[in-house]
Image (cartoon, helix red, strand yellow):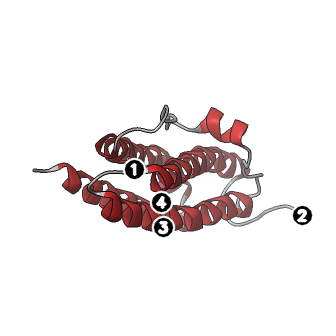
Amino acid sequence: MKIDIGISEKDRESIAKGLSRFLADTYTLYLKTHNFHWNVTGPMFQTLHIMFMDQYNEAWMAVDLIAERIRALGFPAPGSYREFSELSSIKESEGVPKAREMIRALIEGQETVVRTARAILPGVEKAGDQPTLDLLTQRMQIHEKNAWMLRSLLEE
């Protein structure tokens, strides 16, 4: 059945493509954070282990919201490692970095997700897609806060 939600098919497709990149970045950051949760060591172990768990759990819930928004716009959501690796701006970490390098990598990942969201905002606003705008605004707020909290761990 044809979708008639007041947003043209062309705009819905453009937004869905942007959200697919956003989903890939979010999923990649989730996976990286979960990996670091498992493998962190050192004097900050307890703090980082718990912080990483909080952040990956929150990201896990977000991937569903993003994928469901893509579906509501009438397009399939990417869902394979291949698709995510092709769409994501976040690069995998090699090996098991030291704790401070994990923090730096996650700051970069959090900020990358925010930049991806910001890049698709103009088209979302132009199309009058308030649900997607709301989703992106909430996600940016969370990722900016996460980046700030992680950055604070690097200060002396």
Picture residue at 89% right of the left edge, 64% below the top: 1
Mark positioned earlier in the residue sequence (1 or 2) = 2
- The disc at residue 134 is 3
Front-lying residue, 84 or 55: 55
Q: Which residue is mark 2?
A: 1
Task: Say which residue label 1 marks.
Answer: 110
> In the rendered structure, which amino acid carries the disc numbered 4?
Leu
Residue designated by label 4: 136
* Front in this rendered view, residue 136 or 35: 35
Secondary structure state at the residue bearing disc 4: helix
Disc 3 and disc 4 in contact, CB within 8 angstroms:
yes
On screen, residue 59 versus residue 20, left or right, reads: left
Place of residue 11 in the rendered image (x, y in percent of width and height, measured from the top left) = 64, 49
**Residue type (three-letter) at the residue carrying disc 1:** Gln
Please tell me which residue is depicted at 31% across the width and 54% down the height of the picture: 147
In the image, is 156 to the left or to the right of 20? left
Report the Cα–Cα distance between label 1 and label 2.
38 Å
**Of pointers 3 and 2, the one earlier in the residue sequence:** 2
Q: CB atoms at circles 3 and 2 under 8 Å apart?
A: no
Please tell me which residue is depicted at 48% across the width and 60% down the height of the picture: 136
Where is residue 152 drawn, in percent x and y? 20, 56
Q: Name the spot of residue 76 as percent of width and height, x first.
A: 77, 52
For badge 2, the amino acid type reads: Met
**Is residue 138 visible to us here?**
no
Instruction: Assess disc 1: are there few (<14), some (14-19) or many (≥20) residues with their C-alpha within 10 Å of its C-alpha.
Output: many
Alpha carbon of mark 1 to alpha carbon of mark 3: how far? Answer: 18 Å
In this rendering, is residue 40 above or below 71? above
